[in-house]
Image (spheres, helix red, strand yellow):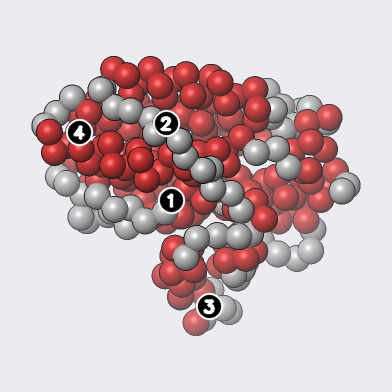
Amino acid sequence: MTKQEALFNYTLRLGDSSIILAQRLSQWTGVGPFLEEDLALTNIALDIFGRGKSLLEYAARVENKGRNEDSLAFLRNDRQYFNYLICEQENGDYAKTIIRQAFIDCFDLMLYSELAKCKDETIAGIASKSIKEITYHKRHSFSWIERFGLGTEESHMRAQNAINELWRFTGEFFEMHESDEVLLKEGISVDLKSLQPKWENEIKNLFAKCNLQIPETAFMQTGGRKGIHTEHLGYLLAEMQALPRMYPDAKW
């Protein structure tokens, strides 16, 4: 694998994870638990969409085959997407959405903090801007977990059920693939294995404070980096891509 191919694959995966997660979060717009939270989650989705747009725009430039961020976002099928599986999981109730977001926010803050120091100026610039946004996102999701875990019996139960369901998708965060290895030698990518103990420690400390438990056994799901997804992604893309596919030559 050449450096160009690795860089394209790397930025594409980061961009895919961002826009798929943002699409999921945007489904809460107008139906949040109360107005302030409705606006908060919508703004978080917009932040993540913005990051995804920047990453896909850079991926298209690196590929240099005439595609742009719109064609990458709207004209690929599910087997051509390489996002983390956790990003495509259905929102479920609000506890499930928040648990998913907390897992991702904690990982993203560590990942993008390292990417801000990488030798690729474009990725470093995107990461530096993203750090400020992710810091807020993490503070938001972590505070909600405390409210769920230390709230009522039902709120605690819903949070625990969400952890039990979603924990099996977190191992994929730390998988190293060929593109990661190639770019690691170039000072661009991040050694994901080195982030895992830090991430697990922070999540465990949060859950301990909130009387929540990590499942003792869970078979970690994988496949996102190979274009193998759960059934949810196809439905999500059908919704997200409907208009651009109906009017592919439309100008806005």
Please tell me how crowded label 2 is: few (under 14), some (14-19), or many (20+) other residues with Cα within 10 Å. few
Q: CA distance from mark 2 to mark 1?
A: 30 Å
**Relative image position of residue 156 (x, y in whole percent):** 20, 33
Frontmost residue, 136 versus 232 = 232
Mark 4, residue position: 156
Sequence-first disc among 2 and 1: 1
Q: CA distance from mark 2 to mark 3?
A: 44 Å
In the shown orientation, is residue 173 left or right of residue 141? right
Q: Secondary structure at mark 4?
A: helix
Sequence-first disc among 1 and 4: 1
Whether residues under marks 2 and 3 lie with C-beta atoms below 8 angstroms apart, the answer is: no
Sequence-first disc among 3 and 1: 1
Mark 3, residue position: 245
Which-is-in-front pick, marks 2 and 1?
2
Q: Secondary structure at mark 2?
A: loop
Which-is-in-front pick, marks 3 and 4?
4
Q: Secondary structure at mark 3?
A: helix
In the shown orientation, is residue 56 left or right of residue 40? right
Frontmost residue, 159 versus 113 = 159
Sequence-first disc among 3 and 4: 4
Q: CA distance from mark 4 to mark 2?
A: 18 Å
Vertical placement of residue 43 versus 189, above or below: below
Mark 1, residue position: 22
Q: CA distance from mark 3 to mark 4?
A: 42 Å
Residue at far front of view: 217
The image quadrant that residue 213 belongs to is top left
Q: CA distance from mark 1 to mark 4?
A: 26 Å
Name the kind of residue labelled 1 in the image.
Ala
Name the kind of residue labelled 2 in the image.
Glu
Name the kind of residue labelled 4 in the image.
His
